[in-house]
Image: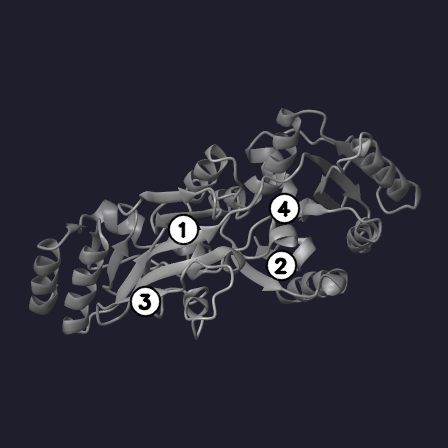
């Protein structure tokens, strides 16, 4: 460590809790991507916006790079500090400041986990639509900085759609407040939109207000086995044409499901294997026979040859089991394989041809690679993993 780095590390430790031990650097210096070896100078754990400002000012004066750190659940290396950067972890800034039932908003510090936000909204009789498998670890600031999507984008949109206000510390340590938390906000430039999806390049998000909504009605969760990718997109179109309100519509190729069944010891809900699977969740209409309406539409889909086989969840437990088959894919692949991951968005109508070409070209380049593909068919976002 150079004298200048030593001086900076000492100065940082005077304004907030810091760590530089090997275990902390390995843990906080990277996300789930395994391609890079973490080597941060130190990890800072501010507990207030003032401490964040002090840390940033010291790094600014020393012209030393910073890597903002949330739950580090990404798979793109965005939270990796491999060249002596100062990692600023927001995990100690984890207060839910207020839930405003009348305005249907929740205000919280950047280190609050997605799951904690969901629970606070639920306790207030409201609903936060932002949802993904890493909700127990992912944090508010990171969700906003990456404009996180998740499994419910088809119904509720990206994180961007729910941010009413945010605070961020800029590179010189100054604090900017973006938005007024209003539904109709004509107060000039909507600067918060620049920070949403900025990946920490414009500043460190320290606090935000999210819009909540009324809890959705009961839904029907279905796991369907399909013979082709074209059937998957046709099933999506069919459900939309029939007026079905879809809360999620997920795609899982057999190559992505197999590791979950093997390593997580999950049971295959269908009697035989299929090349493609769709996990969908449909809102049940408020009519007395609402469930029957959805089930009849699904039966028609089978009769039209859009679905080879399916299972409809009959209980909350079974619904969670079906969801886990999709949610465990990313974690399982990362834990048991070296993966080359691509996160790609295309028009949903082009997905069958796109995947076919991806697999063909991958085999031409490296015949031993296995393409494990899954993702959000409803919004065209695919997770392409070469094992």
Q: Which of marks 2 and 4 is nearer the N terminus?
A: 4
Secondary structure under tag 1 reads: helix
Question: For mark 1, does the 10 Å Cα neighbourhood hold few (<14), some (14 to 19), or many (20 or more) residues?
Answer: many
Name the spot of residue 162 as percent of width and height, x first: 51, 55
Q: Are marks 3 and 2 in contact (CB under 8 Å)?
A: no
Mark 2 or 1, closer to the camera: 1
* Residue name at image x 42 percent, y 51 percent: 32
Instruction: Pick the residue in front: 275 or 212.
Output: 212
Name the spot of residue 220 as percent of width and height, x first: 72, 35
Mark 4 or 1, closer to the camera: 1
User: Disc count in the image?
Assistant: 4
Name the spot of residue 113 as percent of width and height, x first: 40, 44
Q: Are marks 4 and 1 in contact (CB under 8 Å)?
A: no
Mark 3 or 2, closer to the camera: 3
Q: Do the residues labelled 2 and 4 touch (CB within 8 Å)?
A: no
Residue beneath disc 3: 203
Residue beneath disc 1: 140
Secondary structure under tag 4 reads: helix
* Left/right of residue 316 with respect to residue 35 in the rendered view: right
Secondary structure under tag 2 reads: strand
Residue beneath disc 2: 381
């Amino acid at each position: 460590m150079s004298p200048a780095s030593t001086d900076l590390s000492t100065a940082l430790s005077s304004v907030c809790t810091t760590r530089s031990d090997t275990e902390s650097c390995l843990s906080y210096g990277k996300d789930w991507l395994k391609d890079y070896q973490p080597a941060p100078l130190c990890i800072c754990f501010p507990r207030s916006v003032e401490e964040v400002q002090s840390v940033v000012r010291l790094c600014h004066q020393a012209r030393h790079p910073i890597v903002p750190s949330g739950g580090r659940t990404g798979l793109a290396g965005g939270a990796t500090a491999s060249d002596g950067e100062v990692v600023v972890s927001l995990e100690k800034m984890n207060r839910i400041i207020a839930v405003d039932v009348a305005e249907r908003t929740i205000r919280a510090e950047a280190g609050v986990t997605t799951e904690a936000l969901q629970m606070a909204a639920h306790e207030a009789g409201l609903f936060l639509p932002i949802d993904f498998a890493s909700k127990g670890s992912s944090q508010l600031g990171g969700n906003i900085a990456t404009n996180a999507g998740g499994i419910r984008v088809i119904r509720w949109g990206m994180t961007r759609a729910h941010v009413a206000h945010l605070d961020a510390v800029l590179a010189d340590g100054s604090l900017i407040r973006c938005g007024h938390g209003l539904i109709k906000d004509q107060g000039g430039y909507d600067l918060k939109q620049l920070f949403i999806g900025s990946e920490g390049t414009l500043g460190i998000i320290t606090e935000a207000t999210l819009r909540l909504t009324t809890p959705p009605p009961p839904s029907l969760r279905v796991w369907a086995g399909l013979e082709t990718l074209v059937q998957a997109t046709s099933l999506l179109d069919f459900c939309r044409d029939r007026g079905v309100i879809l809360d999620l519509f997920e795609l899982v190729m057999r190559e992505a499901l197999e590791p979950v069944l093997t390593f997580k010891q999950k049971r295959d809900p269908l009697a035989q294997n299929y090349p493609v699977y769709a996990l969908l969740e449909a809102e049940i209409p408020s009519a007395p026979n609402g469930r029957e309406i959805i089930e009849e539409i699904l039966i028609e889909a089978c009769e039209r040859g859009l679905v080879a086989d399916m299972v409809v969840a009959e209980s909350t437990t079974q619904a969670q089991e079906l969801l886990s088959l999709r949610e465990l894919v990313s974690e399982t692949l990362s834990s048991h394989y070296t993966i080359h991951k691509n996160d790609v968005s295309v028009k949903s109508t082009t997905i069958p041809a796109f995947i076919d070409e991806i697999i063909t070209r991958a085999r031409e380049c490296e015949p031993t690679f296995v393409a494990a593909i899954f993702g959000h068919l409803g919004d065209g976002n695919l997770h392409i993993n070469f094992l």
